[in-house]
Image (spheres, coloured by chain):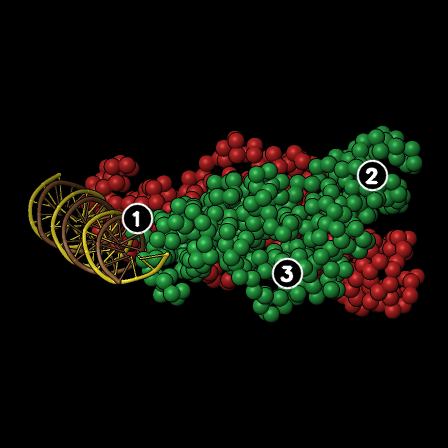
Chain colours: A green, B red, C brown, D yellow
Amino acid sequence: MDMSERKLQILQAIIMNYLETAEPVGSRTISRRFPMGISSATIRNEMSDLEELGLIEQPHTSAGRIPSSKGYRLYVDHLMERDQMSQAQANALRGILREKTMQLDSMLREIGNLLAALTKYTAIVTMPQLKKAKLKHIQLIPLDQKSVILVLVTDGNIVRNHVIPLKQPLSGEELYRLSDVLNRHLSGLTVSEITLPLIQKMKGEMYIGHDMMESLLNAIHDTMRYADDVDIFTSGAANILNFPEFSNIARARAIMEFFQQKDQMLHVLGGDSAPEEENTAARDGKLRIRIGSENQIEQLRDCSIITATYHYNSQSIGSISVVGPMRMDYDKVISALEYLIHDFPDLFDPESSQEEDGYEKGREG
Amino acid sequence: MDMSERKLQILQAIIMNYLETAEPVGSRTISRRFPMGISSATIRNEMSDLEELGLIEQPHTSAGRIPSSKGYRLYVDHLMERDQMSQAQANALRGILREKTMQLDSMLREIGNLLAALTKYTAIVTMPQLKKAKLKHIQLIPLDQKSVILVLVTDGNIVRNHVIPLKQPLSGEELYRLSDVLNRHLSGLTVSEITLPLIQKMKGEMYIGHDMMESLLNAIHDTMRYADDVDIFTSGAANILNFPEFSNIARARAIMEFFQQKDQMLHVLGGDSAPEEENTAARDGKLRIRIGSENQIEQLRDCSIITATYHYNSQSIGSISVVGPMRMDYDKVISALEYLIHDFPDLFDPESSQEEDGYEKGREG
DNA sequence: TGTTAGCACTCAACACAGAAGAGTGCTAAC
DNA sequence: GTTAGCACTCTTCTGTGTTGAGTGCTAACA
């Protein structure tokens, strides 16, 4: 069976109508609303073919047709009309850039909030993974007699702090000198490059007691290893309840529970795509679009996820996703995310993120 | 009409049954399940009285009775049987304390997660308000040519960092000296005590260019002023969808939307209690219990909120709340929160939080 | 005077049946 | 290849009893 131009037109009509109404689409509706010079009977025949091709399906015998995951996929890859993001939306996103000096963390949060507000879906941002970024600066700050704060700054302007226990008090002066040694040895490295042997090597240069040093350095090492349980930020989770496909409370609960489970979200979002997925779910090499059953997780079978990955030093360090019903406005979401990618080239383009001062530059252009 | 002992017994029976089943309770159910030597007819008469007193209500003529907000209030204040928290629960909470050195922020998050898991309701934690805590340490850390990070540590072990723009680069050495001056002048003060005149006074002591200094100090001042949009942490939001009272999707959405609106949550949780509320909603001066219609917010009319406020330096700096359906297991939630209060006396008791090293001590006992 | 049995009444919830309506698939004609 | 027509299917809606839980009232009883 051939995939004629007309079949594609009809598929597109079905999808467009369904995106709007969330109701199964019948042949007569199409012949009325999308006049293409053929009768509903002809459309019926074509629809029958489309169904056989697995692009649309029938909830029950006497209902209209709704798009299948495969149908949406075809639509997204080939049929969708891409229009420019509205000026208002672009301005909203650009508004983020106004605040000139911002840490990556809070910037990402802002982006998440804005995406959720803009799309009316749910935005999920995985915060930058410390592990993969290069350390720019390390500083120990006194907390109390028994502990200090270790502040890590990476070249992506990620700032993290962790409390480290102390065996005996250290003066501010000592902490400063210690920070200095740490900086000289560790800055420029990624956290995962900081190994125990390297830590051992530093001990010679330290001025304070030997076993004191030992335990402190070990603590720093541990902290860096385990500091990195990735944070996830979700915005607009309730938005998704506005769509009729989630008026079923069980589904609503399932998706809300998903939003609660960090591990699972990480697995789905940050996750390395399964091999067989590569050719279907990838797009432009920039956005990753997973539609309905393309998601492995049961709870997401009725959802689509569009993910942009952001980079630093050619390494993917986190992602920004929009989750919505399968019947989502793909065009709008993709536009928004592509706008982001375009406007923050240093953040999203693996090739252009080598330079110092990283994503800052993206903001100017 | 007098409030006889028997009426109270019947009210208690109604509430206990309703907490369990979520169904309106009839007179016969009570006479069968809570034998107190009177017939259902008598119970009917008493119930009629209880309804007139506003303690129970009838969804419709031929249904049983359900407790009203006022009924729950009476129950919580006078009837509820308080049993000890189960050993398992206590252990779970005590587990938090194991991790000896923890920042207040992450500890509160942990507490929130645990409360949600323990109670099966939703926990909301408002993070400590920087404004009201005393500064313990201030440190400037280099970020890049155009900005530095201002790290603030308060005596409650709250750590916050903010990026501050720079007019011209400063060396690490300069930043260190600058930090030193800031510390000498500002530590021991609360953020709100740091006024512009005070900032001006410091300028003399600085070694770097005059207008450079001016702008940096102003930026610090601004940062401290505005740094403090209070963060809120929510855990187990989806839990609440498990209860039949939220199987209505509109209600589910309303409550989920509430969990999204930081401003509104702050208003409800941190909020100063309305004057007329004082005598009804307060309890023990420790926990604040708001039942159903006692909440001002429409979306929370079917919910109850139990809030514990934590303190530092005799100042309330944040709160921990559990939100559940009005038909919540008050006993369990109150036990859990009181356990917390008991185990972290320095955190929750305004009188005992003066000392250095604050809430740390609570963990030992 | 308080308690209880009995009874009529109310009302939500459920099940069933019929009607309406949307949509299909098939067939035959164009 | 296209289309009109028609029988058929299946959901949705509406109306109608029926059931059962629960009440309120009354009259009798201790």
Asked if marks 3 and 2 touch (Cβ < 8 Å), the reply is no
Residue with the mark numbered 1: A61
Write down the chain letter for disc 2. A
Q: Nearer the viewer, mark 1 or mark 3?
A: 1
Residue A103 in the image, given as x and y percentages of width and height: 72, 55
Ranked by sequence position, the earlier of labels 1 and 3 is 1
Q: Are marks 1 and 3 in contact (CB under 8 Å)?
A: no
The amino acid on which the numbered mark 3 sits, given as a three-letter code, is Tyr
Amino acid type at image mark 1 = Thr
Q: Can I make out residue B201 in this image?
A: no
Q: Residues within 10 Å of mark 3 (few under 14, many from 20)?
A: some
Which residue, given by chain and number where applicable, does mark 3 sit on? A339
Chain holding disc 3: A
Q: Is residue A272 left or right of residue A190?
A: left
Could you say whether the residue bearing mark 1 is in a helix, strand or loop? loop
The residue that label 2 is drawn on is A169
Which residue is drawn at the image coordinates 79% and 37% (left, top)?
A193
Could you confirm whether marks 1 and 3 are on the same chain?
Answer: yes
Q: How far apart are the alpha carbons under marks 1 and 3? A: 42 Å
Disc 2 residue type? Pro
Residue A259 visible in the displayed image = yes
Image position of A17 with respect to B153: above or below: below
Depth order, front residue of B332/A350: A350
Question: Residue, x 36% and y 62% (percent of image)?
Answer: A38
- Determine whether the residue tagged by mark 3 lies in a helix, strand or loop: helix
Query: Which label sits on residue B23?
Result: none
Label 2 SS: loop
Residue drawn at x 45%, y 54% is A4
3 or 2: tag closer to the N-terminus: 2
Of the image marks 2 and 1, the number of the one nearer the N terminus: 1
